[in-house]
């Protein structure tokens, strides 16, 4: 008896038919058939008796033409298979995203570095600038002095120190507990200054960032000798037992330097005579010293504060002054001119608020530029951010199962692909163009272009730009829907047996 077969047309079971009858039906190689003796349904192409019913048509071609044997790398087959088996489930999307966000972090750190570099460079430049201004004021010295003098006005008063001294000697009980200031220098006449006089400015460099400004103001003055002296009379014996006056018996005016000349001499003690600090007198520097505390730029200024180290004042204070109005003085044998000092200490200080503001501004600008570049790249080069599902997987051509693709992702370098056809290995360069919508497969001797029709985790559909044919690929390892079909086939078999 001639063997008969059943076949499935979609889900409908048909038959039985003899082999001759099946020849007229036009079965496909994948059509499922069953005959007595089969344990399960089989595809026509797997049944030797039925191969004669199939039309002799060539199998669907691969989407890539087979390359010449010269481009086949047989020695890489074993390594490639191992590599592809190891990376087929790798999360390229995660690693590509990691690269993107890692790059953003690196760019942000770079922006911070650039911000610090710009600010530090500017700070170094501005510090050199203000240091140059300071050195210009000091004329490369560590101490300079200059002053100014005007006509001194005040009141002149005779004290009659000689008479007062005699009175104090005659009556010790009348000595006060504290002598008036003019008695310290035994002054006969005092000048109480009301305005004018001299002002001396002294600038001292304690270190490259530490300075003292000392100002000396003239005060009162006094004379150490009286304005006149009494000349006692002189007598001569007349030879008759009597005497006659030959001279004396009158007040003689003493020469005393004028008040103005006394102040002038005291002023020159500091300046022209340069006796206070030899070598420090610097004519024309008075205004510069007076304006010294106002030296500043964007990042640096001179702050009146406590010294960080030794100060010429001898005290760790922001400012100081001499005690009393009649202590320090310039004097000679004829006069004494008093002066009072006031000192301030200055430290070269960074303008932290301005520096921090510039730092944040520069970092913000740098970060803004980086994000602008990334935004432009995202808009103009979306290929770097799209289709990440394409990479790190083995894609099998559903019509030509002997063909497998593997695409390797490179965020900065070239992206490559590997193709396997019947255990033959081919390599090429992958280019994503048309804003991420087109795949360009570049071989050593040709290029092929495909439009991406659909892509997800498990499925990839491409349309050939050349002939508009559709190529469907599936990720190897994806869950197959054939399981449902197998269940249907098992159910149909049970119904047939019944």
Image (spheres, rainbow, N blue to C red):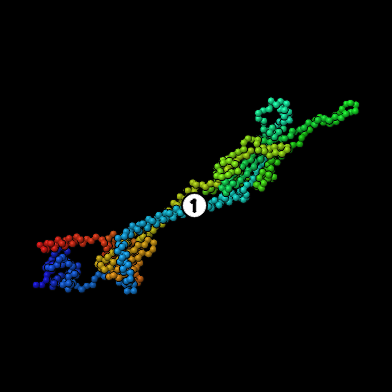
Which picture quadrant has residue 344? top right
Q: Position of residue 366 (x, y in %)?
A: 44, 54
For the N terminus, the quadrant is bottom left
For the C terminus, the quadrant is bottom left
Residue placed most toward the observer, 262 or 376? 262
Residue positioned 62% across, 47% down in the render: 143
16 lies left or right of 314? left
Which picture quadrant has residue 495? bottom left
Is residue 364 visible in this depiction of the protein?
A: yes
Q: Position of residue 467 (x, y in %)?
A: 29, 68
Q: Which residue, as the protein is rendered here, is positioned at the far left?
A: 1
Residue positioned 62% across, 48% down in the render: 142
Residue placed most toward the observer, 77 or 351? 77
Which picture quadrant has residue 3? bottom left
Q: Which residue, as the protein is rendered here, is positioned at the far front?
A: 172
Residue positioned 85% across, 29% down in the render: 235
**Is label 1 in a helix, a strand or a loop?**
helix
As drawn, 462 above or below 174: below
Residue placed most toward the observer, 294 or 393? 393
133 lies left or right of 156? left
Q: Residues within 10 Å of mark 1 (few under 14, many from 20)?
A: many
Q: Position of residue 466 (x, y in %)?
A: 30, 68
Q: How many marks?
A: 1
Q: Position of residue 239 (x, y in %)?
A: 90, 28
264 lies left or right of 379? right
As drawn, 312 above or below 418: above
Is residue 470 visible in this depiction of the protein?
A: no
Q: Which residue, as the protein is rendered here, is positioned at the far right?
A: 240
* Residue hosting label 1: 119
195 lies left or right of 79? right
């Amino acid at each position: 008896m001639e063997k008969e077969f059943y076949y499935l047309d979609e889900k409908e079971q048909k038959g039985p038919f003899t082999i001759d009858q099946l020849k007229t039906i036009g079965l496909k190689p994948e059509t499922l058939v069953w005959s007595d003796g089969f344990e399960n349904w089989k595809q026509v192409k797997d049944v030797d008796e039925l191969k004669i019913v199939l039309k002799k048509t060539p199998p669907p071609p691969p989407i890539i033409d087979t390359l010449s044997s010269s481009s086949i790398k047989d020695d890489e087959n074993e390594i490639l298979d191992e590599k592809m088996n190891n990376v087929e489930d790798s999360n390229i999307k995660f690693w590509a995203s990691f690269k993107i966000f890692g790059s953003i972090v690196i760019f942000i750190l770079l922006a911070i570095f650039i911000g610090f570099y710009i600010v530090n460079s500017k700070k170094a430049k501005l510090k050199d600038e203000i240091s140059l201004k300071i050195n210009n004021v000091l004329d490369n010295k560590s101490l300079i002095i200059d002053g100014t003098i005007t006509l001194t006005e005040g009141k002149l008063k005779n004290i009659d120190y000689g008479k007062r001294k005699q009175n104090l000697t005659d009556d010790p009980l009348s000595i006060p507990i504290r002598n008036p200031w003019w008695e310290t220098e035994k002054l006969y006449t005092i000048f109480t200054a009301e305005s004018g006089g001299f002002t001396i400015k002294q600038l001292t460099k304690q270190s490259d960032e530490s300075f003292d400004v000392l100002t000396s103001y003239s005060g009162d003055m006094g004379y150490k000798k009286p304005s006149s002296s009494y000349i006692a009379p002189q007598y001569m014996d007349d030879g008759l037992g009597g005497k006659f006056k030959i001279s004396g018996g009158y007040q003689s005016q003493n020469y005393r330097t004028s008040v103005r000349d006394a102040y002038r001499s005291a002023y020159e003690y500091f300046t022209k005579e340069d006796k206070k600090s030899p070598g420090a007198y610097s004519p024309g520097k008075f205004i510069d010293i007076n304006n010294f505390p106002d030296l500043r730029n964007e990042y640096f200024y001179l702050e009146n504060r406590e010294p960080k180290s030794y100060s010429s004042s001898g005290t760790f204070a922001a400012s100081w002054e001499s005690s009393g109005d009649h202590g320090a003085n310039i004097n000679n044998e004829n006069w004494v001119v008093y002066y009072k000092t006031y000192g301030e200490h200055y430290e070269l200080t960074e303008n932290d608020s301005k520096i921090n503001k510039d730092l944040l501004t520069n970092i913000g600008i740098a970060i803004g530029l980086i994000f602008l570049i990334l935004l432009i790249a995202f808009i103009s080069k979306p290929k770097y951010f799209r289709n990440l599902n394409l990479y790190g997987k083995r894609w099998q051509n559903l019509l030509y199962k002997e063909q497998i693709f593997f695409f390797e992702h490179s965020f900065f370098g070239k992206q490559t692909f590997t193709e396997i056809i019947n255990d033959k290995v081919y390599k090429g360069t992958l280019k994503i163009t048309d804003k991420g919508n087109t795949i360009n497969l570049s071989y050593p001797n040709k290029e092929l272009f495909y439009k991406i029709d659909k892509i997800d985790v498990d499925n990839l559909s491409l349309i050939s730009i050349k002939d508009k044919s559709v190529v469907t690929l599936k990720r190897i390892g994806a869950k197959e829907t054939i399981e449902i079909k197998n269940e249907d086939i098992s159910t149909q078999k049970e119904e047939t047996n019944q």
